[in-house]
Amino acid sequence: MKKIMDGQHIYKSFDAEKERIKVLRDVSVIIYEGEFISVMGPSGSGKSTLLYALSGMDTIDSGEVIFNHQRLGACGETELSDIRRQQMGFVFQQPIFLNNLTIIDNIVLPAMRDNRKKVKELASKAQQLLEITGIGNLAYRMPNQASGGQLQRAGICRALINEPKIIFADEPTGALNSKAAEEIMGNFLKINQEGITIMLVTHDAKVAAQSERVLFMKDGQIIDELQLGKLSNQTVEERAERVTRKMLKVEM
């Protein structure tokens, strides 16, 4: 399989009052093109920090991150910004939208920097994404006229508008009820089936169970992983039991 992301010997620390806290300690991880990978671990284990480090959203103390044959550490901030905007998509626990713009305008906005003369095409594409995620009727509503689950689906549309090679999702179902979470995971599975790589951070074993591979972190290191493969004959519940058993061992 072809690598899309290769992080090697990553270290990351933060200053906290009188001490420097090591959040990532010699972390190495490879993500393959088209893979759906989840990261789990106790709070403070470094899950989100790893996501930010791999995506170039945060600088690292040492180590190397290569994305799509590009060494992110060698890129200037403008180049990094272009890579994130053009080749990566981001979905967070709390979707952030500009309240003075409609949902469809929020989705189109990130793509306009590169395609100012193609606004109509972008709007058509955004509408299509909204239809695919089941919220086509919300295009011209304001963000405060949509539920949390609907906004999260709109956030997925925004992440997809530039046809990214990879989507980074940080606790995308964390603030949702179980029904909305299932719908969001259904959207991610469809996206992944179309060949887009997904790296997802989660506390939820049922969410992680729907990915192909689960990395388990503790104290800033990847200490174990679970190969699940594609969803097939096993139910999500059966896979979630395997994830939970592994997670309990990690937390011991």
Image (cartoon, rainbow, N blue to C red):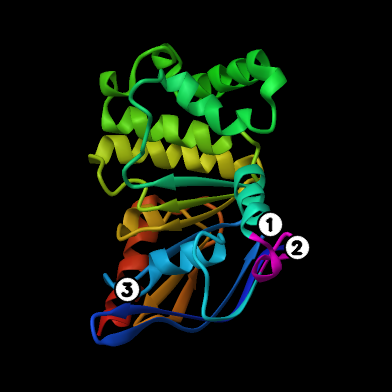
Q: What element carries label 1?
A: loop
Instruction: Please provide the residue range marked out in magenta.
Output: 66-76
Residue on which disc 2 sits = 2
Q: Nearer the viewer, residue 13 or 46?
A: 13
- Residue at position x 70%, y 19% in the image: 118
Q: Which residue is denoted by mark 1 in the rendering?
A: 33
Please tell me which residue is depicted at 33% across the width and 79% down the height of the picture. Answer: 15
- Residue 235, percent from left and from top: 40, 51
Q: Where is residue 131 in the image (x, y as percent from the top left)?
A: 50, 19
Q: Do we see residue 165 in this rendering?
A: no
Specify the quadrant that holds the N terminus: bottom right
Q: What residue type is labelled 1?
A: Glu
In this view, the residue in front, 248 or 31, is 31
Question: N-terminal of the two: label 2 or label 1?
Answer: 2
Q: Residue flagged by tag 2: what amino acid is it?
A: Lys
> Dot 3: few (<14), some (14–19), or many (≥20) neighbours within 10 Å?
many
Please say if the residues under marks 2 and 1 sit with CB atoms less than 8 Å apart.
Answer: yes
Q: Is mark 2 on a helix, strand or loop?
A: loop
Q: How many marks?
A: 3
First in residue order: circle 2 vs circle 3: 2
Q: Residue 94's x, y, as percent? A: 31, 43
Q: How far apart are marks 1 and 3 (CA)?
A: 26 Å
147, above or below 181, in the image:
above
What is the distance, in whole Å, between disc 2 and disc 3 at their CAs? Answer: 28 Å
Q: How dense is the environment of label 1, judged by Cα within 10 Å: few (below 14), some, or many (20 and up)? A: some
Q: Do the residues labelled 1 and 3 touch (CB within 8 Å)?
A: no
Residue pointed to by mark 3: 247
**Can the viewer see residue 43 in this picture?**
yes
